[in-house]
Image: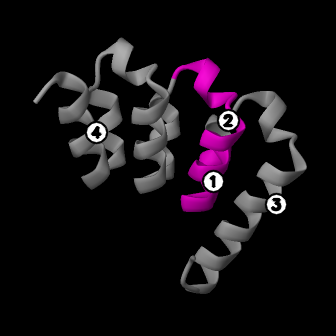
Amino acid sequence: MNAKEKILATVREDGRALRLANAELKSDREVVLTAVRQCGWALKYAPPHLQDDKEIVLAAVQQAGWALQYASPALQDDPDVVLAAVTEYTRSCLGLETD
């Protein structure tokens, strides 16, 4: 198993493990997307160019609305991203299941 396969297996279980990856793997779009789908907070450990990737940021905020704070300024102002973050946060506060 190579390093990418190892980190993918790890972040599938705990997205926050992205913080343990080396810079090359933190810059790997597949690795980051996998991590934020498991734990939106993992967006914190992504490099700026991936914090500016709308698909990655949407996946993060749909998992954890508060992850919006780690998105690029442009995406923090994107209506689709903000709506997804607010929706997830509201559902979380009300104790509703997310899809």
Q: CA distance from mark 1 to mark 4?
A: 20 Å
Quarter holding the C terminus is bottom right
| Lateral position of residue 31 relative to residue 77, left or right | left
> Is residue 5 left or right of 56 when viewed as pictured?
left
Residue 48: give x, y in percent of width and height: 61, 20
Q: Which residue is mark 2?
A: 71
Of residues 38 and 3, the one drawn nearer to the viewer in this rendering: 3
Q: Note whether 49 is above or below 91 in the view shown.
A: above
Q: Estimate the spatial distance between the alpha carbons at disc 3 and disc 2, rounded to whole Å.
A: 14 Å
N-term mark: 1 or 2: 1
Q: Residues within 10 Å of mark 1 (few under 14, many from 20)?
A: many
In the rendered view, does 9 fall on the left or right side of 88? left
Query: SS for tag 3?
Result: helix
Q: CA distance from mark 4 to mark 3?
A: 28 Å
Residue placed under numbered mark 3 in the picture:
83
Q: Quadrant of residue 3?
A: top left
Upstream in sequence: badge 2 or badge 4: 4
Kindly check if marks 1 and 2 are in contact, taking CB atoms under 8 A apart as contact: yes
